[in-house]
Image: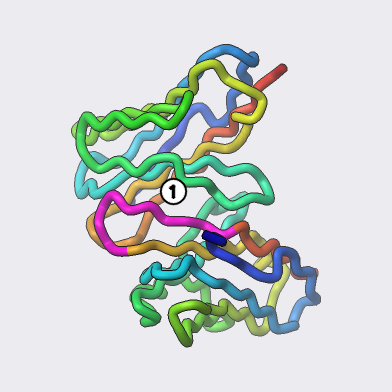
Amino acid sequence: DAGVIQSPRHEVTEMGQEVTLRCKPISGHDYLFWYRQTMMRGLELLIYFNNNVPIDDSGMPEDRFSAKMPNASFSTLKIQPSEPRDSAVYFCASLEGSEAGNTIYFGEGSWLTVV
Amino acid sequence: ILNVEQSPQSLHVQEGDSTNFTCSFPSSNFYALHWYRWETAKSPEALFVMTLNGDEKKKGRISATLNTKEGYSYLYIKGSQPEDSATYLCAFRVGSNYQLIWGAGTKLIIKP
């Protein structure tokens, strides 16, 4: 199994530019999560989907952030316009089923630097 | 405000020694506790998902216990090796939704 695949792994962009992060969940997993990791706030859940439908986006910081999941094998997280405070590691994760004992699997993260 | 605390924040351990650290979480509305091992530039690796009070789980030299009544979990590493150096994160799952509350992690450094 290839695991959760994220791209790009690293991105450096200028303030004001649009950033699109991509994620391919593990095949067969029906939940997909977007997290952000910063030194100050640790791991924060931004949004999660179930069967491609956004369920909870209360963690999305502001209107500059948007996420889509057009099909079961692909999701994007977009930041427009980007700001230096958006610099962080963005993780995508996926999960099969909803039972308490199920494991959430993470991708390797997209390291974003906005200058 | 729900809070998950991990202690210590960092830990230096001599190779070969055993060690343990703690994750404290709210004792109400418990659904599950997750342990992850995270090396920088890699994906967090799932170690355990614990759901029942008194659970004990083991994976090689790493084991974990769970006490949901008092709200803590211990992670033990027996005979530490350099490859155990990582940050160990725990996450508390509140109810059946997926808002995991994450601890700040314990950074473990194994000295050869």
Q: In the image, is B45 to the left or to the right of B57?
A: right
Say how many tags the image has.
1
Prevailing secondary structure of the magenta residues: loop
Q: Is residue B16 magenta?
A: no
Q: Chain of mark 1?
A: B
Q: Position of residue A43 (x, y in %)?
A: 51, 54
Instruction: Tell me: residue B100, above or below residue A79.
Output: above
**What residue sits 58% from the left and 82% below the top?**
A64
Residue A103 included in the magenta stretch of the image: yes
Q: Looking at the image, which residue sits at the far front?
A: A1
Q: Position of residue A107 (x, y in %)?
A: 56, 59
**Percent position of residue B3, x then y:** 37, 45
* One can see residue A36 in this view: no
Residue A82 visible in the snapshot? yes
Residue that mark 1 sits on: B102
Residue B23 is situated, as x and y percent measured from the top left of the image, at: 39, 34
Q: Quadrant of residue B28?
A: top left
Quarter of the image for residue A37 reads bottom right
User: SS class of the residue under badge 1?
Assistant: strand
- Left or right for B71, reference B16: left
Looking at this view, is B96 or A73 the one in front?
A73
The one nearer the camera, B106 or B38, is B38
The three-letter amino acid code for the residue at tag 1 is: Trp
- Residue pictured at 43% horizontal, 31% vertical: B59
Range of the magenta residues? A97-107
What residue is rendered at 25% in x and 43% in y? B51
A63 displayed left or right of A112: left
Determine the residue positioned at 47% across, 82% down: A69
